[in-house]
Image (cartoon, rainbow, N blue to C red):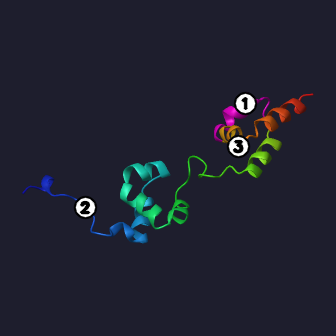
């Protein structure tokens, strides 16, 4: 048997060890990169509920799931410096989508109408 024929696998329960997952997650810059390149480690983190702790090690390119609460969205709308809704959408795409999903779009429209009247 030659070198290329030897299967390189981790020992059984390797990813159930938190230290192994920490060492693996440090190799990546984003959660997506971690998920795509280390699937077993990623799913082990989810299964063992280590995701919040381990995700603090690497930066999120996007906001965490459920980041945009109603209070955060209202605060973002009230404290924005955009000229129009289109600018707001371009700068805050995820927040804009969430605003439409939870029904805050009329509040956003009213904000921009009052801002320039």
Look at the image and tell me in which quarter the N terminus lies.
bottom left
Residue 112 is inside the magenta segment: no
Residues in magenta? 81-94
Residue under pointer 2:
9
The numbered mark, 3 or 2, whose residue comes first in the sequence reads: 2
Q: Residue furthest right?
A: 117
* Residue at the image position 41 percent from the left and 63 percent from the top: 44
In the image, residue 15 lies at what x, y percent?
A: 37, 66
Q: Report the mark closest to the observer, 1 or 3.
A: 3
Q: Is residue 44 above or below residue 79?
A: below
Which residue does the numbered mark 1 point to in the structure image?
87
In this rendering, the label closer to the viewer, 3 or 2: 3
Which is nearer the N-term, disc 1 or disc 2?
2
Q: Farthest residue in the left direction?
A: 1
Q: Position of residue 72 (x, y in %)?
A: 74, 50
Q: Which residue is drawn at 61% across and 49% down?
A: 63
Q: How far apart are marks 1 and 3 (CA)?
A: 20 Å
Q: What crowding class fits label 1: few (fewer than 14 Cα within 10 Å), some (14-19), or many (20 or more)?
A: few
64 left or right, relative to 32: right
What residue is at 67 percent from the left and 40 percent from the top? Answer: 101
State the separation of the CA atoms marked 3 and 2: 45 Å
């Amino acid at each position: 048997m030659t070198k290329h024929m030897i299967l390189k696998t981790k020992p059984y329960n390797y990813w159930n060890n938190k230290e192994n997952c920490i060492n693996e997650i440090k190799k990546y810059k984003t959660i997506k990169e971690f998920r795509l390149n280390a699937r077993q480690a990623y799913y082990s983190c989810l299964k063992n509920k280590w995701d919040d702790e381990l995700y603090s090690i690497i930066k999120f390119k996007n906001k965490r799931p459920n980041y945009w609460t109603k209070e955060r969205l209202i605060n973002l709308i009230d404290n924005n410096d955009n000229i129009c809704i289109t600018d707001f959408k371009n700068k805050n795409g995820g927040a804009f989508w969430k605003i439409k999903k939870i029904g805050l779009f009329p509040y956003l429209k009213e904000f921009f109408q009052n801002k320039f009247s």
